[in-house]
Amino acid sequence: MSYHPVVIYVLVLLGFVVTNLILAHVIGPKKKTAVKQMPYESGMDPVGDARQPFDVKFYLVAILFLVFDVELLFLYPWSVSAYTDQHIIPAELSDTVFGVMLVFMTTLAIAFVYAWRKGVFRWR
Amino acid sequence: MIELITTLITIGAVLGGTLGTCSYLIYVERKLSAFMQDRVGPNRVGPYGLFQPLADGLKFLLKEDIIPDHVNKVMFLIAPTISVFTTLLAFSVVPFGDVNTSFKWQDLPIISSFVPESWQTADVLRFLVAPNVDIGIVFIFAITSLAVYGIILGGWASNNKYSALGSLRASAQVVSYEIPLGMSVLGIALMAGTLNLESVMGKQTSSIFAWNIWYQPLACLIFFTAALAESNRMPFDLPECEQELVGGYHTEYSALKFALFFLGEYTHVVTVSFLTVILFFGGWHLPFIAEANLDANSTSILMILVKLGVLMLKVFLVIVFIMLLRWTIPRFRFDQLMGLAWKVMIPLSMANVVVVMTIKQFGISQWWLLPISLALFGAAGAIGVATKQAELNQRSVTTH
């Protein structure tokens, strides 16, 4: 197990990306005009700023995502250790682990149904 | 030292391969779209328009790189680089050939006489940038989910209403489809007992019935759909739908910075296709042509090339399928999009995980997974149709 190729790859990629940015800056004409520097809003003069408050639904989705993503992080270690040939989980604990996972899934399903009934997934 | 050189050659091959493939994928996509819409497509630059990608690349380089006055400059510059950086980085743990075989310097006909003696038995190139990364799948998900920062930062820094709306939609969409994507792979992880992509692929290479698609058809469907949504491809390209949002989060971008966003999207499509083939369709395995038990001469260059060819062909077919989908299915509405992720795919993938773990726990034959998966899919369809019908009935009652 070695991660140093990943590090080298990261360095190469950083070089590639930075070169691209510099190339974009160096090559190519630069003729600033007032219209070109305006926000593009289909030819209309922009009214106000784009930094405006947005719908609270996006926050709800983000929070639910956090819940499920943490749950996924919990499931991954279990999934690679539960049923391998090396018996990482001792055989006598196997049934207990299965039960615990079922309880965990059920809890999650109840939370999911609660969020659904509360109308988190209703987009209007 | 030689290890470093092998790594660098591999990285060169991967970068060159993905960048070259991406530019020609754009050509393939334009030709395919033209074919489906009864047009000719690019045919001016070179024979059959084959040099079109080169011309496009030059054009991207030579056009003016506009940085409007109203943007947040630092973020505006960083956003496209994040987008392309993350998608290319995710490729570092994706095997693109049979990782147990490799070219050695002594196999190369002419070049081998020029390299030092100590290099002869070393690898020229590996079929994987970073071998033996045990967290392969999690690594890919972790890195590709960072790509959403590119989209959010790009949209926010542009300070343009179209961009802001596009990036909001994109982030909600990417975040929602992340969960079914991760959950559908859990079934594979349970069956294979590992997250290492090399071993997952290696376990499927004995016969065609070892391919995971036989045991996880539902997971495959969920994975593929969620991955499409993650890469913002049709029919999930709401963040950049032209009719409503002009260009979405990249409205204000031009020249090479726009090209970087584009490159990021196409690299994502390539990675997703590789993952689909490796996780569900047996990697480089093809019955009678490339099989693990035909491998008496697995070191021969011909065999390596055949395996490479089979894998590439499968990946290409998946990519063509994605392109055909683009002109087959119309774009979703935003509430349908979020509904599909949260109300359909997440419950289904959770049910899939429970089924796999039950089968594993009680030692039941894995073949039961096939009918159960199909039954789950059918049940989901039936429930969907029934709810829609009830909704329609209710609506007709209230309107009359």
Image (cartoon, coloured by chain):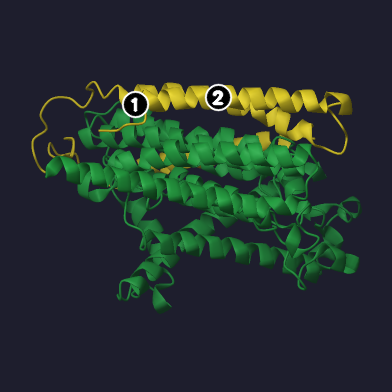
Chain colours: A yellow, B green
> As rendered, which of B121 and A95 lies closer to the eye?
A95
**Amino acid at circle 2:** Leu
**Mark 1: which secondary structure?**
loop
Q: Is residue B303 above or below residue A16?
A: below
> As rendered, which of B313 and A14 lies closer to the eye?
B313
Mark 1 and mark 2: span between their CA atoms? 17 Å
Q: Residue furthest bottom?
A: B47
**Amino acid at circle 1:** Gly
> As rendered, which of A114 and B22 lies closer to the eye?
A114
Residue A108 is labelled as 2
Q: Are marks 1 and 2 in contact (CB under 8 Å)?
A: no
First in residue order: circle 1 vs circle 2: 2
Q: Give the quarter of the figure containing the N terminus of chain A.
A: top right
The chain holding disc 2 is A
Q: Which residue is mark 1?
A: A119
For the question of whether residue B374 can be seen, the reply is yes
Q: Is residue B180 above or below residue B51?
A: above
Whether labels 1 and 2 share one chain: yes
Residue visible at 32% across and 31% down?
A122
Q: Position of residue A17 (x, y in %)?
A: 49, 40
Residue A95 lies left or right of residue B71; in this view the side is right
Residue visible at 31% across and 39% down?
B335
The chain holding disc 1 is A
Residue visible at 54% across and 61% down?
B318
**Mark 2: which secondary structure?**
helix
Residue visible at 75% across and 55% down?
B204
Label 2 CA crowd tier, 10 Å (few <14, some 14–19, many 20+)? some
